Amino acid sequence: MPHYGDLQTQIYGAGLSGVVPTYPVDFATLEKRAQSALPPHVLTYVQGGCGDEWTQDENARAFRHWGMVPRMMVDATHRDLSTELFGLDLPSPVFMAPIGVTGMMSQDQHGDIAAAQASALTGVPLTASTLSNDPLEDVHAACGDTPAFFQLYTPRDKELAESLVSRAEKAGYKAIVVTLDTWVTGWRPRDLNPSNFPQLRGHVLQNYFSDPRFRQMLGGKAPEEDLRTAIGTWGATFGKVLTWDDMAWLKSITKLPIVLKGICHPDDARRAIDTGADGIYVSNHGGRQANGGIAAIDMLPAVAEAVAGRVPLLFDSGIRSGTDVVKAIALGADMVGIGRPYSYGLALGGAAGCAHILRCILAEADLLMAVNGWPTLAAVREAGATRTDR
Ligand SMILES: Cc1cc2nc3c(=O)[nH]c(=O)nc-3n(C[C@H](O)[C@H](O)[C@H](O)COP(=O)(O)O)c2cc1C
Ligand SMILES: O=C(O)C(=O)c1ccccc1
């Protein structure tokens, strides 16, 4: 069982020989450092959100109105953060959320591979985005023994959707995460002002360009031969509008568990389970798609109640620390997704920077459980969290 909190001892120990951590251990410093490390067009895309970013800010801020109560005289010398998901034994409930410009986060433009390597180093599963600078097969291969999930942006062309899913299944991914909230792009002033949309410049489209069905859609031409046409073809097929009627089709094209990402309403969670979803993923896309929405963490308890343990409940949007991870578990999540923080870790130090940030988040969660007398995730759930602003 990994002792994530040992990172703290290692950091203080190294300090005695004058060595301090290469990368920051907290989100605020990390974000500041990433701001100087990233080119402006990548930074605005990653850091920005929808409208005046009220929902994006609320996502993180809302964690501050949930509080936890410690228990004493409990032996929490050993903490067990391990969990099970779709029959997989995982060392912790933390995973990497899909981030479509991961490829652009490292200077060599192979950030997807670097994130996969960080996954191999830490045991934190990666959800590989459809939008990638490296084909999904190569990304999976770099994950080593750590299981990975494939996030599907469902193309309008059903054959292309089926091809992507079957490639993911063959490559060894363990679940298909279907994103529901992004068939159209939200209004993002930080990218609209400089007219910045990486995909339209040919970035992160390698899963399409390497796909036999996509190449067939180009009339057999290599995408590189006529990049404009290839990008236009991508734009025309990118976002299928999914409705509940599509669930039967989605279920029919794979044996893998289907997780629906972007569920916020308890009624949608119930409907998802009724129509065959194998997992529910509460997320508001980090506030990048719809502004004005309630913070994701505030929607989690009601969805958890609706799901009632029938299928795994995944969560992201606003996780910035190990404390946030523990709060999300306390409020009903089974698995907690890290988004922007791992992206910034990649920007600072590739696979090593990314692995460092994940380890810091895990160390903080582990030490919080130690101090609060919660040796297991079940104890965290039982303790729960209370709204402090009422
Ligand atoms: C730059 C960027 C790109 C993203 N690309 C994808 C994507 O390709 N697919 C997807 O389902 N979600 C995508 N997301 C949303 C994340 O999976 C996740 O929901 C979000 O980052 C959570 O918010 P947080 O990072 O503020 O915690 C993206 C998020 C960011 C920041
Ligand atoms: O930037 C995003 O959040 C994202 O996932 C996306 C992908 C394609 C089109 C629009 C948004």
Image (cartoon, helix red, strand yellow):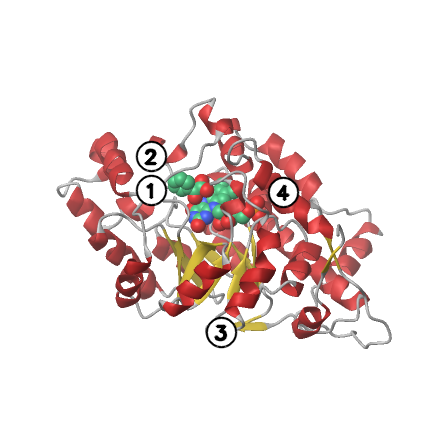
Residue picked out by circle 2: 202
- Whichever of callouts 4 and 2 sits on the residue coming sooner in the sequence is 4
Q: Looking at the rendering, which quadrant does residue 150 occupy?
A: bottom left
The residue shown at (29%, 47%) is 240
Please state which of residues 17 and 238 is positioned toward the viewer in this rendering.
238
Q: Are marks 3 and 2 in contact (CB under 8 Å)?
A: no
Classify 10 Å Cα crowding around label 2: few (below 14), some (14-19), many (20 and above).
some
Residue picked out by circle 4: 58
Q: Looking at the rendering, which quadrant does residue 52 occupy?
A: top right
- In this view, the mark in front (3 or 2): 3
Position of 13 with respect to 257 (left or right) is right
The residue shown at (80%, 64%) is 69
Q: Looking at the rendering, which quadrant does residue 324 occupy?
A: bottom right
Mark seen at residue 320 = none
Q: Look at the numbered disc 2 and give the secondary structure of its residue.
A: loop
The residue shown at (72%, 58%) is 364
Q: Give the Cα distance between marks 1 and 4.
A: 31 Å
Quarter occupied by the N terminus: bottom right
Q: Look at the numbered disc 1 and give the secondary structure of its residue.
A: loop
Q: Look at the numbered disc 3 and give the secondary structure of its residue.
A: loop
- Whichever of callouts 3 and 2 sits on the residue coming sooner in the sequence is 2
Q: Where is residue 21 in the image (x, y as percent from the top left)?
A: 73, 47
Amino acid type of disc 2?
Gly
Mark seen at residue 310 = 3
Q: Can residue 102 be seen from the camera position used here?
A: no
Q: Give the Cα distance between marks 4 and 2.
A: 32 Å
- In this view, the mark in front (1 or 4): 4
Q: Where is residue 12 in the image (x, y as percent from the top left)?
A: 81, 54
Q: Where is residue 100 in the image (x, y as percent from the top left)?
A: 43, 44
Mark seen at residue 205 = 1
